[in-house]
Each structure stands twice: as structure tokens, then as C-alpha cells.
Image: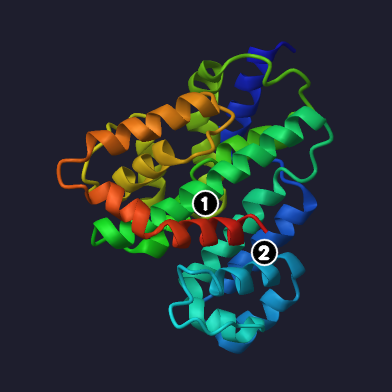
Amino acid sequence: MNRLEAFRSIAVQAGRGELVFPTNVNASIKLQQALNDPNCHLEAASKLVMAEPLLSARTVAIANSAAYNRSGGEINNVRTAVMRLGFKTLNAITTAVIVRQLGRNISDPEMRVKAAQLWEHTANVAALSQVIALKMTRLDPETAMFAGIVHEVGGFYLLSRTDEFPGLLDGNAEDWAEYGEKMIGRAVLKKLGIPEAVMAAVESLWHGIRVLPPETLGDVLLLAKELSPVPSPFQKSALEAGRQSDTIVDEFMGDDALRDVLEDSADEIRSLTSALLI
């Protein structure tokens, strides 16, 4: 099977809902479903989180990040962290664990590097989305962060299948956009139970046009993606991404709004990105 045939095969399987997840991802999806149960209360949620070391560490780290720790008081336990963050943010963190796990079982060193870069890109987009939504729109910043976390989940899924299909990513980014991004991305988002509004925002990246200042969740996500200092390995080089980020900021200097937000929120963005990268 050549590379393009493999792309088509994976896309067709995904379109039929035939997704192949590592065992640890399936376990985390069950955890996510339990946390999303409306009958799951604080104590039960805290116990579920504490049973997962990676989720526990990330929950406490994000609760202590500058984006969520306005008072400066440091939290050192999961229960208090869950209380500070709330269930919506906890769901985003759980999903972040699932997304990252997709890249942890890859054996090919080159693909592991791509997965690590994709997660660093994702963390930056999620943090930028949260701050942009909070400071520049009336949109829910937690939903924006969640959209940032899942916006490249199709890419993570594709990377998780590269051991089965050697040479799958030897081509260029156009192959991914043409043969996989929409079908694979949409199928994985559906499998994870992503809300329609967030799915629509992610899908807007595939055909969206930048709107400044941002108005919709899709606008926020597209702006955050373009501003990310780390590009997706499915896109352009880091140098081109950096130039693009500077250009976007320069284009929106009529009222200095975007530059002010980025400068004033630099600590929040950096702290939240670091917490997501744990």
C-alpha cells in the first residue's frame, strides 16, 4: 500500500467510525465520560482525577498557573484544584491527556518528534485561545481553551497510526489537507464527544478567513493558531510561522488592541502553556 492509499484507507475507516486507539486512550475516554456525567460531583471527580497521576499533576499545575491563580495562593492538592477550575476546565484537561496519549506509543523517533512538536503547538494555541477569548471577546474562555486543545486531534490520531503505515508522512502538508484532515479530524472529534460549537470552530480552520478583531470561536482559534510561536508539523516552518505572527500583530495595530493583549497577558500565556506541557 503506497502513502496516498494509506491516507485514503485511514480516512475511510475514520469516516465509518472505525477508529483504532491505544489502550491507555480508551481508558482515558472512559474517565472523561465519567467526569461528564451530570451526577458526578466534586468528591467523586477529585477521586477520579487522583487515580490518574498525569491528570492530577496537570490539574494542579493549571490551577496554579497565572491564568487561574489570581490571588497568588498556591494549591497543593487535587480537590482544591478541581474546585478552583470547575468541571468545564477539568473536562478540557482530561481531553488534553487523551490527545497527548495518542502520541506516546509511537515507536518511530522521527514521528515522536513530530508528535512532541504538535503537542507544543497545541498547548500554545490553547493558551492563546483562552486569553484572546477572555480579553478580546465575550466568548467563554474555557471553551476557547478546549477548542485549542482538540483542534489538531486528527493529526495526533494520524501520527498514532504511522507505525502501521511506514512512510505515511513522507509527503507534504497538502496530502494531509486533501486526504485526511477533514474526515479523520471530524471522526475523532465525534468519538471524543466534542460539542457541535467546538467542532464547528475546528472545522472553520479548514476553510476559515481571518477576522480581526475576532468575533466567533472559530475566529479566536484561527488567530491563536496563526500567532502560535510553534507551528504544527503539518504546516509551515517555524521561521515562516514567526514572520506570520509578526505580520498579524502589525496588521491589527490600528488601536494596538492585539499587541496590548499579548504583552499584558504574556505571563498568563506562558504559565498556562507550561502547565499544559507537563
Q: Residue at x 45, y 62 (%)?
A: 268
Q: Residue at x 55, y 23 (%)?
A: 176
Amino acid carrying label 2: it is Lys
Q: Residue at x 34, y 29 (%)?
A: 207
User: In what element is the residue under mark 1?
Assistant: helix
Q: Label 2 belongs to which residue?
A: 30
Label 1 vs 2, first from the N-terminus = 2
Q: Please state which of the two labelled residues, at mark 1 or mark 2, is closer to the viewer.
A: 1
Q: What is the total number of numbered labels drawn onto the structure image?
A: 2
Q: Position of residue 265 (x, y in %)?
A: 39, 59
Q: Residue at x 65, y 59 (%)?
A: 29
| Residue 173 image-quadrant placement | top right
Q: Is residue 245 above or below residue 57?
A: above
C-alpha distance separating marks 1 and 2: 18 Å
Q: Image quadrant for the C terminus?
A: bottom right
Q: Is residue 8 above or below residue 138?
A: above
Q: Position of residue 122 (x, y in %)?
A: 54, 45
Whether residue 190 is visible? no
Q: Is residue 228 above or below residue 164?
A: below
Q: Label 1 belongs to which residue?
A: 149
Q: Position of residue 131 (x, y in %)?
A: 38, 58
Amino acid carrying label 1: it is Ile
